[in-house]
Image (cartoon, rainbow, N blue to C red):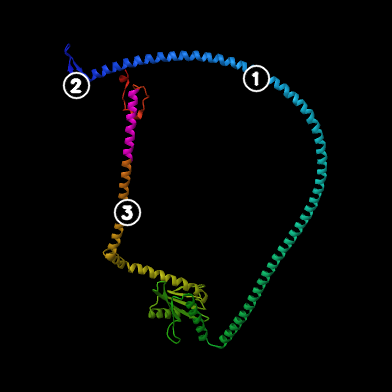
Amino acid sequence: MVHKIECEHCGNKINIEQSIWKSISIDLNSKYIKKDVEIKVREKALNDEKDKQDEEVAFLVAQERSLLVKEYNDAQKIQEEMIQTEVDKRAILYKELLDKQIREEVKNDLEDAKQKNIENNKIKIENMKLEATVNTMESQHQVDIEMKVAEAINFFEKKVIEDREQQRSENDVKMKQMQKSIEDAHRQSNQGSMQIQGEAQEQTIESFLKYNFPLDIIEPIKHGARGGDCLQHIVNNNNQKCGIIYYESKRTKNFENSWIQKFKADMREKNVDIGVLATQAMPKSMKRAGLVKGIWVCSLEEFKMISHILRKQLIEIYKIRSISENREDIVSHLYRYLTSSEFKMDMEAIVEGFTEMKLDIDSEKKAFHRIWSKRGKQLEKIMLSTVNMYGSLQGISNNSIETINGLELPGADYSQIKE
């Protein structure tokens, strides 16, 4: 609020605060100017006195320095003469001593050289002996290594030869046994009937299936019964039955087309998925395994490969069928799970975990806000103290201190206050 009064003489309104401030400013300025003049007068007197004393001191110092230089030069000259005389005397004495010492050193050096030459010769001889010994040891070591390597090679070669001979002997025994078995089988074949040969082939198929597919159920067909040789019930790793393969073998010189119709009738009767006919005589139109009216026809060797492929195919077909058939069951199971208490408990556990995490985050956020608030107040306190100190210094120096932008109001002009 601005306080004004009316002048008794002219009737104008006068700002009391501005008038008081102007009066105080004029009074302070006059006192400051007077004080400044006194200080300058005293400084000039002190400077004049100091200059006069400096000149006197400089003259006395120069005079003293001149005397000291003269005395030093005289003493230096006398000292140099005395030193030169002493140097000459000592040079003569030193030369005599040096000549004597040199002669003795030369004599000693010659004797040392002779002694060192003798020692060097001894060292050379010892080095030569040592080198010869090392070479001998290296040669012996190399020979030992070569001998050990040769022994190892001979041992392994002998071992390989022995193993080979052992294997050869075993193979010879096996070959003889196989040859004997073949001869016996051939003799029996020539003497026996085709029924015995067929039974042998049936046994081969059955043994192969049992050995290679231990999970499957191999069901042999009783001799004399109508039908093929055996049934292979396919079982996967989950112990699920995936299908049936029906095997029959023929050991004749000629292939008969009537086998196919009979085989298909047997398949329908036994309700199997795939039929395989392993025969010695292939159809005239076929050189290798293939389908004949829906029946796989192959040789006994081809049967081994085809059995693996057909088994894998049946397992894959069963998997596809299971997925298609169980689709509605899967949806039903999923619905029951989503509406069950188990799903509710799982979701509650998830929500509880998220809630606890949210509370932890909020707690940490509040703690950091407290820390930041405390530090902000500390910074405000420091800044306020700095501004107060800066304002006091500006007032004391009548705004003579350089302006600090961070501590001034934007656009402020203090030139009028200075004036």
Q: Residue furthest bottom?
A: 191
Q: Give the range drawn in magenta.
A: 375-396
Which amino acid lies under the numbered mark 3 shown in the image of this protein? Met
Q: Identify whether 413 is placed above or below 296.
A: above
The label nearer to you, 3 versus 1, is 1
Q: Identify whether 258 is placed above or below 97.
A: below
Which residue is painted at 50% across and 82% down in the image? Answer: 203
Q: Name the residue under label 3.
A: 357
Task: Looking at the image, tell me whether mark 3 or mark 1 is earlier in sequence order.
Answer: 1
Residue 29 falls in which quadrant of the image?
Answer: top left
Mark 1 surroundings: few (<14), some (14-19) or many (≥20) residues within 10 A: few
Residue 17 falls in which quadrant of the image?
Answer: top left
Q: Mark 1 points at which residue?
A: 72
**Mark 2 to mark 3 CA distance (whole Å):** 64 Å
Q: What is the number of the mark on residue 3? A: 2
Q: Which of 302 and 46 is in front in this view?
A: 46
Please say whether residue 44 is one of the residues in the magenta stretch.
no
Q: Main secondary structure of the magenta part?
A: helix
Task: Looking at the image, tell me whether mark 2 or mark 3 is earlier in sequence order.
Answer: 2
